Image (tube, rainbow, N blue to C red):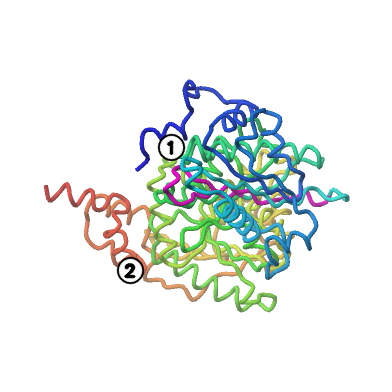
Amino acid sequence: MLSKKRAMSVKLKGDKEISKVLTIKQKALQINLNDNIYGTFAEIGAGQETVRNFFRAGGASGTIAKAMSAYDKDFSDAIYGLEPDKRYVTQPRLERMLSHEIDLIEDRLSRKKHPDKLFFSYANTVATIDFSKKFKGHGWLGVKFQLDPLEGYNEIIIHIRFKQTNAQLQQETLGVLGVNLIFGGFYMHDSPKEIVKSLYDNIEKDQIEIDMINFSGSRFTYVDNRLMSLQLVKNGMTDAVMFGPDGNNLLPAQELYKKNILALRGSFRPVTLVNMDMFEKAQELFLNEKTVDKENTQIIFEITLANLRAEGEINERDFLDRAELLCSLGQNVMITNFQEYYRLVEYFSEFTKARMALAMGVYNLIQIFDEKYYRHLSGGILEAFGKLFFKDLKVYLYPLKNHETGEFYTSENLKVHPRMKELYKFFKYNGKMLDIKDFNPEILDILSREVLKMIVNNEEGWEDMLPEGISEIIKDHRLFGYSRRRLAKKS
C-alpha cells in the first residue's frame, strides 16, 4: 500500500483539485515541479516534440534524466537491438525502448541516494506523413512508470494514426499527446477511463486517431483492456477496435493487413447455436473459395456500437459478458461504429485487397435493401451498393424461419421493396450472394433475445440452446445477471 506521504508525492502536491482541462504547459510544469518524478525520453521519427514541452515549461532539470532520438537505423539497432521483422514503428520496438531506458535508470542511479524517486521512461516510434502525401503516418507511444518506489512498473501503450496532412502539425500534435499520456499515468491512474478521455486534452479529434490502448502493471491489474477499447469507440477516438481471445487489444491495421476477411455481425447476447452454425458454415464456404488462403484468413465477430446502445446507454457489464463468451470460443472480436455494412467493408478495404465476405441472416439482407438507411448519401442506395460490392466481396446468407408457417426464407424467396427488385436481382445473379444450404433446421427457432429472457426469468432449458461449455461460463462467471438472481432466490 502507498503510504500517505508517498501518495502525496504522486498527487497534486499542494495544488487545488483539477476541475478543468489544464494546458499542456500546466501539465508539463506540474510534473516538473514534482520532486520525485524522474525519467527519460526516447523519441524516434517525429522530433523530440514531447520532451520539448517539458523544457519549455521550466523546472525540467529535476525531471528529465535524458532525452534522445536515435534516428539512424544502425545506431538505433546498436542501442535497442535488431527487431526480427526489421521494422521500427512497431509495438515490440516501443516495448524494447521503454524497458531499455528503465534498466539504464535503475542501473545508473542508486536507490539509497534516491529512495523516493518515481522513475519513468517515455518513448515513441513514429512515421509521419510521406512526401507524396499518400500515407499520413502512424506510430506507437508508451510510458512505463512507478507510483511507489517499492512497487513494480506500470505501463500504458497506445497506437495512433495521423489525420493531419502536414508533418510539422503532426509533430506538434504528437508532443501534446505525449504530455497527456505521461500526466494521465501519474495523476489519473485511479481512473483509467479518465486517462483515455484526457488523451485528447488540447487536441481535436480530426487531428489524430487512437485505435489501440493497453494498460498493464500492478496498479492496472483490475483493468479490462477490452473495456478500454470500448471507450475509444464510445468517445469517438476511432471507429473500430479489436481484441483477441486472451482479452488483450489488437491493432486492426496489423491484424487485417492483406488478409482474407470473413466477418459475422450480431448481438451475441448471448452467443447461440444459430450464431455458431452460421459461422461454421460460412467459414467452410469461404475457405473453399479459390482466392482464399486459410493461413492468411482473419475471422471476426463484430458488434456495432448501435447494437450495444440498443436499450439506451451502453451497459459495460453487458458488453463484457458478451466479450467473455466470444473470447472463450477462441474468437477475435471487433467493436465498430459502422451501422451500415458498406462502411464496414470500406474500413476493411483500407488494409486489404484480398477476398472479403460477410455472413448474415436474411433479415439483415432485407435491411441492406431498405433505402431509409442511405438518405444521408447523395447517391442514395446506389452509392452504398457501389461501395459495398465493388470490392472482392461475397455475402453468405443464412436462412430465416417463419415461426408461424415453418417456411424457410432464402435468397430465392425473400421479398424486397418493389423498387429494389431489379437491384436485388443484379447482385444475386452476379454471384455476390450465396445461400448457406447445409444449415441445421432444428435450431432455427433459437433467438438470442428469447434465451436472454429465459436466463433473466430463471426458466429451464436455455442451456441446450448455447454452444458447448457456454452455459457453464454464464453460471460460473455470473454473466447476464444469472448468479445474482440465483443468490437472491436462495436468500
Q: Left or right: where does residue 337 sit relative to residue 68?
A: left
Residue 343 is situated, as x and y percent measured from the top left of the image, at 65, 50
Count of numbered tags: 2
Q: Left or right: where does residue 490 sit relative to residue 211?
A: left
In the displayed structure, 140 sits above or below 401; it is above
Q: Residue furthest left?
A: 491
Q: Residue furthest right?
A: 132
Instruction: Identify the mark nearer the N-term, 1 or 2.
Output: 1
* Residue in the foreground of this view, choosing between 401 and 182: 182
In the displayed structure, 259 sits above or below 28; it is below
**Residue on which the image places disc 2:** 469
Residue in view at x 80 percent, y 57 percent: 72
Residue in view at x 22 percent, y 53 percent: 458
Quadrant of the rendered structure where residue 431 is? bottom right
Residue 94 is situated, as x and y percent measured from the top left of the image, at 64, 55
Quick one: quadrant of the N terminus? top left
* Residue in the foreground of this view, choosing between 422 and 130: 130
Alpha carbon separation for disc pair 1 and 2: 30 Å
Element type where label 1 sits in the image: loop
Residue in view at x 50 percent, y 42 percent: 114
Is 372 inside the magenta-drawn segment?
no
Residue 353 is situated, as x and y percent measured from the top left of the image, at 73, 64
**Residue on which the image places disc 1:** 312
| Residue type (three-letter) at the residue carrying disc 2 | Gly
Residue 262 is situated, as x and y percent measured from the top left of the image, at 59, 66
Choose mark 1 or mark 2, whichever is in front: 2
| Residue type (three-letter) at the residue carrying disc 1 | Gly
Stretch of the chain drawn in magenta = 134-158
Res. 162 mark: none
Element type where label 2 sits in the image: loop
Q: For the residue carrying disc 1, how many other residues have a C-alpha within 10 Å: few (<14), some (14-19), or many (20+)? A: few
* Residue in the foreground of this view, choosing between 423 and 40: 40
